[in-house]
Image (spheres, grey):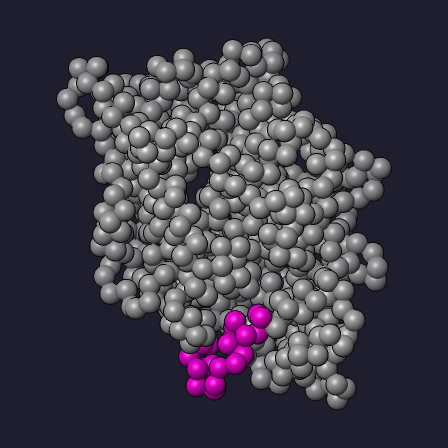
Amino acid sequence: MKKSIIALSLAGAVLASCGAGDQQSDSMNPFFEAYNTPFEVPPFDKIKNEHFAPALREGMRLHQEEIDAIVNNAEQPTFANTIEAMENSGELLARVSIVFGNLNSANTSDELQAIAREMAPELSKHSDNINLNTQLFERVKQVWENKDSFGLNAEQHKLLEKSYKSFVRNGANLNDSDKEKMREINSKLSVLSLQFGQNVLAETNAYQFFIDNEADLSGLPQELREVAFQDAKTAGEEGKYLFTLQNPSVMPFLQYADNRELRRQIWEAYKNRGDQGNDKDNNEILIEMANLRRQKANLLGYASHADYVLEESMAKNPQNVQQLLDQLWSPALAKAKQERDEMQALIAAEGKDFELEPWDWRYYEEKLKVQKFDLDEQEVKPYFALDKVQEGVFMVVNKLWGLTFSEITNIPTYHPEAKAYEVKEADGSHVGVLYMDFHPRASKRGGAWMTSYRPQETVNGERKAPVISIVCNFSKPTGNAPALLTFDEVTTFFHEFGHALHGLLSNVQYRSLAGTSVPRDFVELPSQIMENWATEPEVIKLYAFHYQTGEVIPDALIEKLQKSGSFGQGFGTTEYLAASYLDMVYHSSTCPIEVNAAVFEKALMGSIGLIDEIIPRYRSTYFQHIFSGGYSSGYYSYIWSGVLDTDAFQAFKETELFNQEKALAFRREILERGGTDEPMNMYVNFRGAEPKIDALLKKRGLDQVQVERSR
């Protein structure tokens, strides 16, 4: 049984239908036949919205038949006839749900969103029918209790353990009354989570900030003006400039626009998404979700949702997460206050008498960076053309693992902007297929992520290659220039590519354990360690070429980037940690949350001492990671994995950047193994010891802050 697929469909990639198809449409449904495409990728060119309903319903029907056959098997339960049989069930449902879920995130429409809303309860019911099946659980339990008699290898034992725990953690041991409560909670959560994400997308897309006075563009880079001019033309407002709440638009506006009042307006719009008292307001939704999650955890015997979630993580419990956050909070906040005071002094030096506000932070931070390091991001961006950065990523991966990437043009894609690549080993053997989709559009949710259209597995002794996708929202090309990335976008590219490698290089038997099927606080290790290569001078010279002259980035610019590496980390770490606290306190609650989200958030930020000039990286009403993205009680994972990745990268820094022995060890012990072992075991097998926090503090420039505070 593909529990991971069912979970995916209910946690943000919820699938859908609008009524059964007739016999004719069923016979033409591309999901009902083998994919006759290169590398058996989904036939995106043939898939239409009307195909999802009949395919999903047929998939659920067949899946239930397969489960019934397992339950009604007269033979004694064994690993093969129960656990493997479940693992291999639900093929059609998995194929349809994974395509729909990904399209609903990367290329959605009103029709797809309506389908998803309608079908969420039906899919929740199907999942519960399996997870709460008493007879099925009894067979799984018998196999678990007799596990030593089956001669299982390590991976088989892990699959059995994961299957057994999944049933227990989804309510299989509950009495009938509590099972009904569980069904009701799961159904509500599936709908609310979906609605939350759709509201954020709608709020983001609805905001249009037109400027028709060129004086109001003062300070803005020419590249940003050109994109805004073209966007306004596309929106039917030729001659104006359009700015949106997409990150490549709003963030540089806040960073460069001289007009303080306009910065305030767009910042207010950005921070108030989902918090405007309209039909897209998320306040009641998120509070209800937090309370429902607590109720579900209580039914299962846990004090809080965080206790429930973290039991299966590296952190193990909320106390360990709290300890890490607290360890970082004091030096991060102290550094943020130093940064604030420096910017306030800069304001005074300009002869102005206003107090620094949140909409001023990025603007004066940029000025301070220029003043301190003589580093202007606009001086650097021409060296970070997207195509060259992509070549650099490919070269790094080739140097580490010998992988090669070649574009495939005769293959279906889900959107014209998405491109596909075949990934091969050094010997030419096939590894997998990688889709990459880089720029924002109204049909794509914000952020950047890696996903899968087919997880890796082993079938009849042969490796079934994965189909992986990277989806981002990078700066667009203009009529006069290619897509030029900020350095933050460069590191994001490397980050998501690390996730992609985790999926591509997976080499396990069971797809439920493949690739990124690991705890949240371990899944960011492969992604974040790749960011380290992005910032190394030796590597920067592999991809940083001026898009007009072809000149490699000068050493002087690289030196400025290096010196400014920890600049702004007070702000960056503080806003991140504030959001992590927000997640943990929502989900560590052991009693109902009875205040609205604004009151809850304000009280928490006051209790941890967050300064007024900074807000959490994600305010509650648009915190998609935790309310529609599967990271509830898990947003801390990025900093937890930050400890891992900075420590792990030292294995290369201590030897050489492209140390083949270390790269092979990282591949064998981490990238290939998916969720087949405990994360700490895999890490120690690679590194030889458990990680230390020292490298992370040094990287973020927080080690010196601690020294100063201790004097």
- Quarter occupied by the C terminus: top left
> Residue 301, percent across and down?
43, 74
Residue range corresponding to the magenta coloring: 165-185
Residue nearest the viewer, comparing 709 with 535: 709
Above or below, 415 against 174 in this view is: above
Query: Residue 364 location in percent, x, y?
Result: 30, 23
Examine the structure image and report whether residue 626 is included in the region drawn in magenta. Answer: no
Percent of width and height locating residue 313: 52, 57
Residue toward you, 430 or 387: 430
Q: Is residue 76 visible?
A: yes
Vertical relation: 569 (above or below) 32: above
Residue 240 seen: no
Q: Please tell me in which quadrant of the rendered image residue 350 appears.
A: top left
**Residue located farthest toward the front when viewing the structure as drawn:** 711
Which picture quadrant has residue 302? Answer: bottom left
Q: Depth check: 388 or 323 in front?
A: 323
Residue at point 49%, 46% (across, down): 640
* Residue drawn 54% across the image and 79% down it: 172
Q: Quadrant of the N terminus?
A: bottom right
Furthest residue to the bottom? 74
Please indicate whether residue 682 sits to the left or right of residue 368 in the image.
right
Q: Main secondary structure of the magenta part?
A: helix
